[in-house]
Amino acid sequence: MNNLTLIVVLLALMAIAYQVGLVRSKAVAGTGNNRLHSRPGYYGSLVALWCGLPALALFIVWSLLEPSIVRMLVMADVPNVASMSDTDIDAFMRRLQAISSGFGVGDVITPIELAAAEQFARLQNIAQLCKLAVMTALAIFGLSYARKKISPDLRARNQVETAIKVFLAVCSGIAILTTVGIVLSMIGEAMRFFQFVSPLDFFFGTTWNPGFSSTGHGDGEFGLLPLLWGTLMISGIALLVAVPIGLMTAIYMAEYAPSWFRSFAKPIIEVLAGIPTIVYGVFALIVVGPFFADVGEMFGIQVRATSALTAGFVMGVMIIPFVSSLSDDIITQVPRALRDGSLGLGATRSETIRQVVLPAALPGIVGAFLLAASRAIGETMIVVLAAGNSPQLHANPLDAVSTVTVTIVNQLTGDTDFASPQSLVAFALGLTLFVITLGLNVIALYIVRKYREQYE
Amino acid sequence: MNTTQPTVGDNPNREALRAQVAQSLRKRHAREKRFRRFGLMAVVAGLSFVAILFTSILTKGLPAFWQAQVIAPVFFDPEIIDIPARPQLQRGETPAQFEERDHAWQAELGMVNWNRILENSVIALKPELSSERRDVRAMFTSAERFRLRDMVIADPSLVGQTLDMKLLADANIDVWLRGNIDRSLPDEQQQLKASVRALADQLHAEDIIQIKFSTALFTNPDSRSSAASAGLAGAFMGSLYMMLIVIFLAVPIAVASAIYLEEFAPKNRITDIVEVNINNLAAVPSIVFGLLGAAVFINWFKMPLSAPLVGGLVLSLMTLPTVIIATRAALKAVPPSIRQAALGLGASKMQTIFHHVLPLALPGILTGAIIGVAQALGETAPLLLIGMSAFVANIPGSPVDQATALPVQIYLWQGNELRNFFEARTSAAIIVLLALMISLNALAIWLRKKFEVRW
């Protein structure tokens, strides 16, 4: 019987265990001082947990170890196992699987394969039966153990709730595991990369020309500076577009706009935040790029359709709602007293905003600026489609550039053997990107939090 | 009194002072008006960006749903389709051997001259074209002959029958008839021969080729050789599998984490670190998650490349922080009076949370989950890094088959060389993606409005 059936059987056993616990608890219940500590359902759940959890743990461990153990036992009897590589062994096991399951293979079956397939089938049967037997034994043992413990004094509800609390804590551990996984895996692969290329060459090199992995190792030049410069140029243009528009939008919405206008315009601008970045990329490629090229032609300037300007402009449009909603929160948090004081002294509204509200909100706005910058630096799809692909150090925003994120995509969408420096450099780049965005986020959140304390 | 400033009461300076004050007041009011106008212009700029984006995508993409099709009767000529019946499973035969025989039969069926059947369908309407079979064949897109083959595989009784069918025309014919290519270009720069173009115009004038609404974009898998039949079906299934994995994996784990962090975790340094950690994870660029998927899932766990399973796992990790933050906000919004009332009546903490707080926070949690799923639907970069940049020609049957996703399909199509056909098709695919996302967001907003409780 296969794994799914085993799980179903286990669930059925747990349901039976629940009923057993329920019935037993009602049977031992007395009255007065001898009443049950918890409601009967908790006793049932306790018995079900004792029945199911040990068996489930065994199932997981067994299923993880079984394939490699069976493989070891089967390959021990195959004659020329030393000469077979890992992929050969994989293919051999797949054939055995097909033969033993009755599906058959297309070509002739050798006697060795036949004998190995028979042993494979036998081992699998034995393993499945043993697994079933041990799991059932554990389940029944757990059931009877828990049932024996049922008495009016047993604090079933507390034990069940502790089990649930442990489960919740494990779930929240997964989020930490993710961060740890990101950092460890990237550091690991980046360390392997730095064995090929020295960190100084990487972080301070000015040429990016990785070459192809088939031409040998370490042949290429892996200088980060052109990519970093491209990233900064595009992010700079994006912020130049987004910060004025976003900030003025926030100020207008917060101070001047009538409420009907606010409730109409705000959601529409928020829509910009929800559009997938690939749509922005295609929009930049199809509409904005040719538009800028045409405008450039009108003025006699050579503007490429895919350039830093196109990508930066569209990225700026994408970031506008980000800046706008963050600034809106911060501006509305400035206390009314400051505003009313300034207005009471005869300042116009714009003077109040420019000389009182904005300086008061400045730390928060700087925080919003840094968060928007971190978003712009980490953006991929817009740049992949619209920035051209030219990793060179130049100061012309009307020409093509390449960024860190584009390079990661280019280097990794190819072979999957992570042994060549061409693939490993993607992890070094990713690590750099992660550290930069993490740094910006931490500083931004620190500034915003510190500012919030000022007025509370 | 010793005043140094002249006051308005002093007669000779009164007019000058008033004029000075009036002038500066005018300047300040003008500055105020300019500032206000700047603000309004910024808002209008933002709104117009949204309008430009949507109108350009709609105008480019909507026409792609109407494709040039050949309307003709197709006769499944038994003399052309001259092959034996499909093999049946015999006793004593292993499934592998039967599969081989079946594949051999299908290969034989593929060798049938379906093109001739296609040409005959048009020639039946205009017999004078029987001398221009080559040109007639160029009317159809290359995958239509496989469509006929698949119809016969599914229903062998079709042989000998005549069906009125709508057959997709070739992409270049579609481009020519629509006027998407400059008609005045010389022959070397045109995609089709002159005779083919003339025939296409003639058939179009006689309504044998019509431009009709076609569901090919929705029902066909992607295709390299036959541009006109490239569709989104494979991408749909891939995205669907991934969204299911995200919903059933990320949302429960995220809600459980948020409940623990909000209600049970002790207020010490470790919990602080966990909180900061989750907030930072929410702001990490999506491509870093792709690198994590490539390094851990593909390289270490050796999971299949380009499978929706791996994509779903990576997207779940990305959605986890978003849903955790939304759930925590929803739990915080439930007033303490509810909790204290439950505790006061003798409930335990766990009972309070699961019987009272969680049901009340459920609308907020649902909204956060739907928005998280909608964001995951539109992600492209992490999927590119786990191998989904390859061309996948069939619809995945299970989460471990090779697949692609909607945003990745858009990325692949926009790089296609046949620009004047695929630009419209890419925009149409974007319309489909945006429609899905807008409906998800609208669902979230509707749920929030319907179940919102003001405490």
Image (cartoon, rainbow, N blue to C red):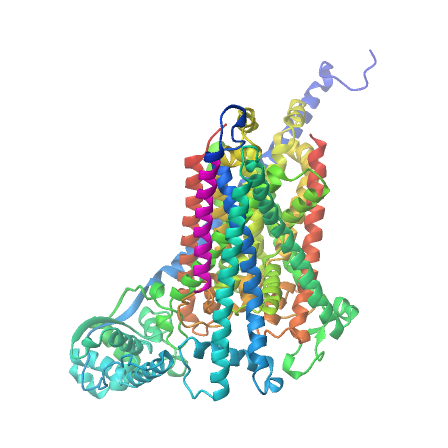
In which quadrant of the rendered view does residue A407 lie? bottom right
Residue displayed at 41% across by 36% down: B450
| Figure check: A126 above or below B112 | above
Q: Which of B182 and B196 is in front in this view?
A: B196
Q: Which stretch appears magenta?
A: A1-25
Q: Nearer the viewer, residue A375 or B20?
A: A375
In which quadrant of the rendered view does residue B56 lie? bottom left
In the displayed orientation, state which residue is furthest to the top: B1
Q: In this view, does A232 lie to the left or right of B174?
A: right
The number of callouts visible is: 0
Q: In this view, does B439 lie to the left or right of B204?
A: right
Residue B356 visible in the snapshot: yes
Residue displayed at 57% across by 35% down: A155
Residue B108's x, y, as percent? Answer: 30, 86
Residue B375 visible in the snapshot: no
What main secondary structure does the magenta stretch of the protein show? helix
Residue displayed at 35% across by 75% down: B172
Q: Which of A65 and B2 is in front in this view?
A: A65
Q: Nearer the viewer, residue A30 or A10?
A: A30
Residue B377's x, y, as percent? Answer: 48, 56
| Figure check: A67 above or below A451 | below
Which quarter shows the N terminus of chain B?
Answer: top right
Residue A243 drawn in magenta = no
